[in-house]
Amino acid sequence: MASMVHVMSPIVTRNLITKFKTQRLKPDLPSLQHSRQFNAIKNDPRKVINKYASRRNIVVSCLDRPNSRPNQISGYDTVMKFYSSINEKNQDQLSSCISSDCFIDDFSFSKPFRGRKEAMKFFEELVKSMGQNVKFCVENVCEGDGHSAAVNWHLEWKGRKFHFTRGCSFYEFTDEGGRLVIRNARILIESPIKPGGITLSLLKNITFLFDEFPKGAELFLEKPYAIIQATIRIYGLFLAPLVNHVMASYLKLLSNMAEFFLLVVKIIIKIRNLFFK
C-alpha cells in the first residue's frame, strides 16, 4: 500500500507525482529518510501539509521493494503513456500498452472486455466518441506494491473541466519483454445521476430480501447476469409490447426535437457566416 501526502508546488504541474522506486526512498534523499521530517510524514501526514505547503506531491511507499531497479519502467510511466495514446488517438501505441490477454472491466458496461481484440474495439469507440477536443486529464497516480497503480482522472474540453466525467481506475501490470503493460483494469466512472439516500434505501431492501431468502441470494450472487437475463425475458413476454410502444413514441419525439434543434443551430451558423465574414 502507499500513503500520499498532497503538498502542492507552484512550479510543479498537478499531474506530477514523485515516485520512490527504491527501498522506501531514493538514495539521493538520505537526509529525508532518516530525518524527523520523514517520521512526521509517516506518523501523521496532516501535520506536514501546512508546514511544507510550498513543496511538491510526494508518494511514500510503506513497504520495501528490494527488487526495484532505478532504470526499470514504472506503472506510472505505463499509465501516462496509456492516457497519452488515447488523447493523441494513437491506436498502435495504445495497443502496445495492453497485454494480449488483458481483462478490462468498465463498470458502466454489463460485461468486461477480454483480450486485446475486445479491449481495442472498446477503446477505438471511446476515442471516436471523445471527438477532437475532449482529453483525459490525469490528476493523481498512486503506485502500489508490486505491479499495480491507482489513478483518478477527469475529462476536459479545450482545457475546461467536463462535469460528471470524474473517474477512478485501478491497473495491474505484467512484464512483457522488459516493459510493463496493462493486464487487468477496473474503471469506475462518476454517474450524472446522484441518487443519494435512495441508494441506502435500496441497499436496505436488498439486504432484507437476501436475509429472508438466502438460497435465492446465493443463486443471484453466483449467476447475477443469468438472473438479469431471465428477468429481461419475462419482461419481453409480458410488459415489453406495451412499454415499448410508449417508449418508441417518446424516443421518436426526442429524436425529432434533437434534429430540429440541430437544424436551427446550422441555420444560425450559416447566417453568421453570411453576414459576419
Image (cartoon, rainbow, N blue to C red):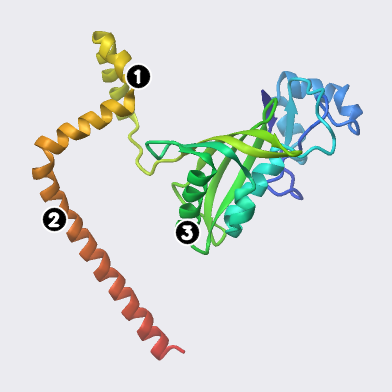
- Disc 2 residue type? Ser
Which disc, if any, is residue 128? 3
- Mark 3 and mark 1 in contact? Answer it, CB < 8 Å: no
Q: Quadrant of the N terminus?
A: top right
Read off the residue under disc 2: 249
Q: Is residue 207 above or below residue 250?
A: above
Res 206 → quadrant: top left
The answer for how far apart the CA atoms under marks 3 and 1 are is 35 Å
Q: Is residue 264 left or right of residue 116?
A: left
In front of the other: 152 or 216:
216
Q: How many discs appear?
A: 3
Residue sitting at x 45%, y 50%: 163
Disc on the earlier residue, 3 or 1 = 3
The answer for how far apart the CA atoms under marks 3 and 2 are is 29 Å
Percent of width and height locating residue 105: 48, 36
Secondary-structure class at tag 3: helix
The answer for how far apart the CA atoms under marks 2 and 1 are is 36 Å
Read off the residue under disc 1: 221
Residue sitting at x 71%, y 32%: 49
Secondary-structure class at tag 2: helix
